[in-house]
Amino acid sequence: VARCDAFLNQIRKWRTQRSRADFARPFATLFQNPVRTTLLLLVLVGFALRARGIPDPMSADEMSVYRTTRGFLERGFPSIEVHPDLPVSYVATSELVYVPSALTALVFSDPNYVVRVPSVLFGVATIVLLYVAGARLFSSSVGLVAAAIYALAPTCVQMSNFGRYFSQLQFFTLLTIFLFIKLILDRSDLGTKRLWVCAICFVATFLSWESS
């Protein structure tokens, strides 16, 4: 608890050294300065690194995700029919993962794209979210370094084109933590809407993988 308080006090100290205009600048200047160009390059490179693995052969886990997605579209909930003579098997974990894949199935018919495109998109979104979180809590430089590490790290790239819950879980976990820290730092503006948004993100994290 003491370490958490020290961490939050340090963030408050950095924030007091910056004006309100400086605090909003990461968004206002995102497309008007070199930071924008760097972030855009990171997003494009990160997308290319992740998307190139989409056509690779699928693993057994990814095939299960695809079959569960088909069951979601056919029956309205995540499920697998092992055999017509057997009862339908309910999938009681990572329920939210099958919503993006079901939406993707409405556009693509290839199982590789159905399962892996959502992971790639969540991975790319996490690159941007890491920049925003780093820039809002610390500085644009911190945000760019964090985004660059995530965009280029081989493990992060691999997990972002693996069609399971990993990429989606990373995105919602980071978003939940970022919003929660913002709520703590801005105690004078604890609006009901902000609390609900944070709570919804937490639920999305939980439903992406209950063990999180």
Image: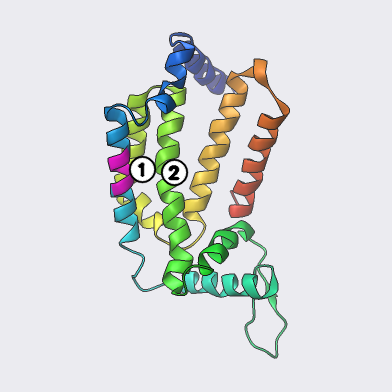
- Rendered-image quadrant of the N terminus: top right
Q: Whole-percent x and y of residue 129?
A: 45, 38
Q: Which residues are magenta?
A: 40-44
Going by the image, does 1 lie left or right of 23?
A: right
How many callouts does the rendering have? 2
Look at the image and say whether residue 43 sits in the magenta stretch: yes
Q: Residue at x 35, y 31 (%)?
A: 31
Image: 130 above or below 159: above
At a point 30% along the width and 51% down the height, the residue shown is 154
Q: Which residue is mark 1?
A: 150
Instruction: Residue under label 2, please give it.
Output: 126
Q: Residues within 10 Å of mark 2 (few under 14, many from 20)?
A: many
Does residue 71 lie above or below 149 as drawn? below
Q: Are marks 1 and 2 in contact (CB under 8 Å)?
A: yes
Amino acid type, mark 1: Tyr
Secondary structure of the residue carrying tag 2 is helix
Residue type pointed to by label 2: Thr
Is residue 153 visible to us here?
no
Q: CA distance from mark 1 to mark 2?
A: 8 Å
Residue 103 spot, x, y in % from top left: 55, 63
Please determine whether, in this image, residue 204 is positioned above or below residue 136. Answer: below
Q: Residues within 10 Å of mark 1 (few under 14, many from 20)?
A: many
Q: Main secondary structure of the magenta part?
A: helix
Helix, strand or loop at label 1? It is helix
Question: Is 77 part of what is drawn in magenta?
Answer: no
